[in-house]
Amino acid sequence: MCVLRLSYLMAIVPVAVLLTASFFVIFALRQVEERALKAFGYVVVGFLWLATIVVFSSAVYRMGQGSFMAKGMMQQKMKMDCMSQMMKKDNPSGMVMSEKGQMIKDEKRPMMPKCGANKGIVTKAE
């Protein structure tokens, strides 16, 4: 689970690249005299910062979702384990298994009628 959280730290790389690009755009804007080009530069910086916020917030959101999903998966596994243990313990009286062994298909037994010989007998499956 810790490895999953650390994998979301890889979002630092695109965040750092976007912030570095916005720094150089702002640095270049100080040298520009033309008003239209300065406005365009500020728009570019705004989009870079917006992209940075989106990348960072999605990494934080996914990191939070990963821990909730891991908890849910663990709870589901615990439920399945409990159910399987209950199924082993519970053995309704109508479902008592014979200890004679596994029946072979179409095995003839003297105490059974000839028509439908193996129907209705419950045996242990192993």
Image: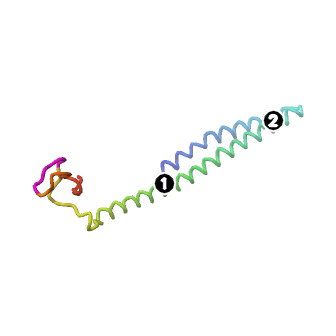
Residue 49: which quarter of the image?
top right
| Magenta stretch: dominant secondary structure | loop
> At 18% across and 60% down in the image, what residue appears?
98
Q: What amino acid is found at the position of numbered circle 2 in the picture?
A: Gly
Q: Residues within 10 Å of mark 1 (few under 14, many from 20)?
A: few
> At 23% across and 64% down in the image, what residue appears?
96
Image disc number at residue 41: 2
Residue 93: which quarter of the image?
bottom left
Q: What amino acid is found at the position of numbered circle 1 in the picture?
A: Ala
**SS state under label 1:** helix
Position of residue 107 measured from the top left corner of the image (x, y, whole percent)? 15, 49
**SS state under label 2:** helix
> At 41% across and 61% down in the image, what residue appears?
79
| Residue for badge 1 | 70
Relative side of 5 to 37, left or right: left
Numbered range of the magenta stretch = 104-110
Position of residue 91 measured from the top left corner of the image (x, y, whole percent)? 28, 65
